[in-house]
Amino acid sequence: MLKKRHQAFVALLCLADAIFIALACLAALLVRRDALGESLAGSFMVMMRESLVIFAIPTTIYLMWGFKLYRPRRDRSMLAELVQVIKASLATIIALVCVLFLVGANPVAGWTGNANINLWGMRLDEGRLQLLALVAILPVTLCFERFVFRIVLRALRRRGHNLRHVAIVGTGRLGQICCRTLERNSWTGIQVAYFISHHEHARLNTTCCDRPVLGGLAELNEILERKRPDAIYLAIPNARSNVMPNVLRNLERHPLDVRIVPDVHPRHTPLSMVVGELDGMPILSVRESPLQGIGGFAKRILDLAGACVALLLFGPIMLVVALAVRMSSDGPVIFRQKRVSLGGEFFDIYKFRTMLYVEDEMHPAQSRPHTANSTANSTANSPANSPASWTARNDPRVTPLGRFLRSTSLDELPQLFNVLKGEMSLVGPRPERPELIERFREDWRGYVLRQHVKAGITGWAQVNGLRGDTSLRKRLQLDLFYVRHWSLGFDLKILWLTLFRGFSHKNAH
């Protein structure tokens, strides 16, 4: 019954896709006809031929099937589906170009090849214009259709329709986490029907998360025959991992979808897991930098462009500040200090000096107590065996000008040169000193995972007010949230919020 329902669901989805593909093709034809000053009138067959519908529909649907867009996606993100839709749409355009090249564009689409259309100063023929329009319209149309489709489907599932009932093998902490997670995400339409204990036998009349426990592993086959679920989740703890091969072997007798929930504590997996394969060997990537590949390249382009624009805008202000620092107190204008960035690499961070200058920073105990600019704006220079601390309010080391620069974050502007050198990013966790990293990595699990991305001038924690002497725990939580959910759009959002929250804040001191 479940298989039949899925086939009907796929048929309905294919029909919806075909309708929107046809609409996209007709819209592209309308753009072409409008540019030529022609009407959309014509026979049905002529419009189908010139709009490329008869080629686009089977090609797009085949490619969407190849991109696995007709598989059940209850527990997968909508964003991942939309990315696959865009890939399939662009692949369709490439396939159409190849077909038209092989069979000839004129007999198929009625294109003359005459460059008689002026588009933004470029001379185009009607064929190229139609394909360009289709490149823009097809992915947008299909993404809109899939988005609406999923929203409606999720709303129906929340109301108790189109549900899928599953069983969970494992009644320990991991099984309970699995059940509660499925409960919270009701949009998936996945409901836990019952549990099966990860022990050989279970006590009678027991429950787990208000669901019945129907037995143990010894009764697995009998339970699945008697009360067959739509899918099964294996949430077996590591202490019982030796039973996993036998459980999987028993499940081969039943036509069920099987999911494995690994017993890895969340504190060890703050970054997204990725499942890969090498020559048939499954590989579970527990942690990896989100900036690998095209993501890192795009972020670097944003950093270079943003830093150049910021230097043009703030260049005059930086010159004024540099002159003011030079005249206000003795010492260098630019303060440098070792910090840690991507992959644990050291670099010299640049800031306008905001503290009184002491020449000997190697022996703070022999200098005037707390009078040197021996810290950056976020940390105090203390001996390695003393507790780490952030700069306090009304710190006597801070000069009057420095207090103003800190409160307005103008002392951070020289870090734009760190960004140009590739040592920092515009957006990322704030960099820390090496000795503090060594201390925090023992006391705060996951602290060094901030180094999976480049340190930044601003960040998610900073725009949420966690600056200066604020909670390290909350700051770490927001930094890891940024690392886990990084995207170019997230960076742009933080840069926009920085304009309103990042320069001046009550915690900046």
Image (tube, rainbow, N blue to C red):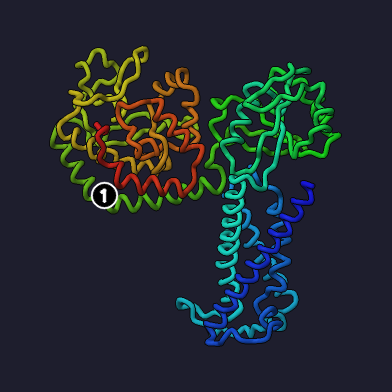
| 389 left or right of 487 in image | left
| 159 left or right of 506 in image | right
The image position of residue 493, as x and y in percent, is 40, 48
Does the image show residue 394? yes
Depth check, front residue: 341 or 36: 36
Where is residue 84, by image quadrant?
A: bottom right
Where is residue 95, by image quadrant?
A: bottom right
User: The C terminus lies in which quarter of the figure?
Assistant: top left
Q: What residue is shown with label 1?
A: 314
The image position of residue 118, as x and y in percent, is 49, 81
Residue shown at the point (82%, 39%) measured from the top left: 255
Residue shown at the point (38%, 35%) measured from the top left: 461
Depth check, front residue: 168 or 376: 168
The image position of residue 11, as x and y in percent, is 73, 59
Residue shown at the point (59%, 60%) measured from the top left: 145
Depicted 360 relative to depicted 165: above or below: above
Identify which amino acid the numbered label 1 is placed on.
Phe
Q: Residue furthest right?
A: 253
The image position of residue 283, as x and y in percent, is 69, 34
Depth check, front residue: 505 or 390: 505
Does the image show residue 76? no
Q: Secondary structure at mark 1?
A: helix
Depicted 199 relative to depicted 119: above or below: above
